[in-house]
Image (tube, grey):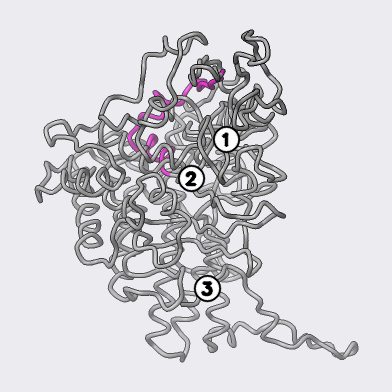
Amino acid sequence: MNKIYIIVFCLALVQACTDPFELTRNDIIQEDLVFEDENLSNAFLADLYSDALFQYTSGQSNFNMNLINAMGGESRNFAPWQAPFGQVIGPIFNETGAGVISYWPYDHIRQCNIFIEKLGESSLDPEFVEVRVAEAKFIRAHAYFEMVKRYGGVPIVTEALPIDATQDQLFVSRNSEKEVYDFIGSEMDAIAAVLPGIADDDGRVTKWAALAMKSRAMLYAASVAQFGNVQLDGLLGFPASEAQSYYQKSLAASKEVLDDGPFTLYRKQEDKVQNFTDLFIDEAGNPEVILAEKWDAVAGKGHDWDLTAHPDGYGFSWNSNYPVYLEKLELFDFMDGSSGKVDRALYDDATPVDPEWFFGQRDPRMRASISYPGMIWRGQTAFYHRSTDYTDPTDGEVKRSTDNSFIIPGSDGWRGAGPRRNINAAVTSLQIRKRLDENLPATGTNLSSTDFHIFRLAEIMLNYIEAAYYLGDPNGDMATYLNDEIRDRAGMPAIPKGEITEDRIRQERQVELAFEQHVFWDLRRWRIAVEELDNKEKTRMHFRYNYDTKMYTIETAPGDRGNVRSHTERNYYYALGLGIISDNPNLIENPGY
């Protein structure tokens, strides 16, 4: 199957001007020709895919790939000069706008509108036109979803304004938050009816992606109705009485994907850790992926996730860039069902901690998602300890080494300390492992080809479970999806139906979807971001190892170099910002700014 790579070489389709005295350029394609040629129309659409904000890839070496995870307090970046540290931890989002997370893509939406209008008027094959227009409508709706999450109601613009547009046409007012969510839902209903179940190119939108989008967006709308407040005369928020209706819409869309879609949870490996690891790098008929942003380093479209996220000590020129907090580790329970939040008195730098229990008995999804001390990676032990105590066999004395080049006498390569970037004061001694390719050669940049899962089946199951919970489990299968599917795949014990609570559902979501750009938005729609993020500093860990007992001692310290996060109540709706407001006098700013 071909892949839709988000790179377009339009100029390869035309010949450049060769006559230096020719005044008519022939290296530009006329608009009326673009929409009368399938190849050129596909090239235009590929640009729309490329411009869509499915994931952040900006920043040197794609450092902003971790931006949303950092915003949600799951992890941060190594260095303050990188946006997911310096522009997330400490700064206050005020009347100047949403800072690094701002998104106001009306230029992108205009391009979508041009494509939808012009292709709809073309003489190309009607089926081709219908499907490609539907794809563009999906991309446009996704842009509105990204905005409504940030700002609430925004102007819904579905026509490309002419060059001579009047002020009334240009200075549009904000639609309500409800109208934006309703627009997304109705668009997904319409395009799901015409999109194919299987795309002709891998990476294109299908019927199932449209339903997945509706599943997610309607769940967000329901949460805002249930946990938020109506403000600005209805411009923001929903009446609480409408929550059930949106939960039902999300439930129905999820159920259609679950019952009729061709997807199953990824279960190719018996080993639970290996299976969850492979889920994110196996692209050979992965049955769980509904829609992915495609990457292929060989084809010239690679990224630097492996380069930046790999632990120090494996040959990558950059590494160890995404430290993970203790608070994230604590969400992963133990395989016997006991809580992952152990008594923090254990972290006194004196009490021995058995790594076979502390790490080895945790939820396998933790061991597949987080790099941790003593794990085996690329055939070697990953070292995150600051020192090693050992008995010197030459004189019988107990000694301590802090030298990462020193091999403990009599050991099988155990080092006195971990590599510098795994243990210094800037790190947390845990790192993101999810999406790393263990077999990737450590050479060059832009070498990663791992796709980004925009929608996968487990999320749809979690959407269904959450909606079903608030609706009173109308189909009686909430526990089945939670236990027989998601937790069984993970190797975790079932939760009795009577113990399935709001908190347990939220915890399951934060574990299953860790580091996949969900947690930050979930905290906001549940309206607990203030509780979890505002004026909070997360926690780092430091490990010492005793080679004689094979135990660690652990101590904790502030995790953000003295900085604290900010997410005030007003930040549930970010400011449009002074620049946007000054450009359009008909826009009303959000409350509190």
Q: In whole angstroms, how far apart are the C-alphas of marks 3 and 1? A: 44 Å
* Of callouts 1 and 2, the N-terminal one: 1
* Residue denoted by label 3: 45
Label 3 sits on a secondary structure element that is helix
Q: Are marks 2 and 3 in contact (CB under 8 Å)?
A: no
Q: Which residue occupies 21% across, 62% down?
A: 256
Q: Residue 164 appears at what percent x and percent y?
A: 60, 70
Secondary structure beneath dot 2 equals: loop
Of residues 424 and 75, the one drawn nearer to the viewer in this rendering: 424
* Real-space CA distance between mark 1 and mark 2, rounded to the nearest whole angstrom: 15 Å
The residue under label 1 is: 382
For marks 3 and 1, the one nearer the N-term is 3
Q: Which residue is mark 2?
A: 434
Foreground disc of the pair 1, 2: 1
Which quadrant of the structure image shows residue 232? top left
Q: Is residue 215 visible?
A: yes
Residue at the image point whose x is 53% and y is 84% from the top = 35
Q: Amino acid at mark 1?
A: Ala
Residue at (66, 76) in percent of width and height: 9
Count neighbours of disc 2 (C-alpha within 10 A) and say few if under 14, some if 14 to 19, many if 20 or more.
many
Amino acid carrying label 3: it is: Leu
- Label 2 – label 3 distance at C-alpha: 30 Å
The image shows residue 574 at horizontal and vertical percentages of: 49, 37
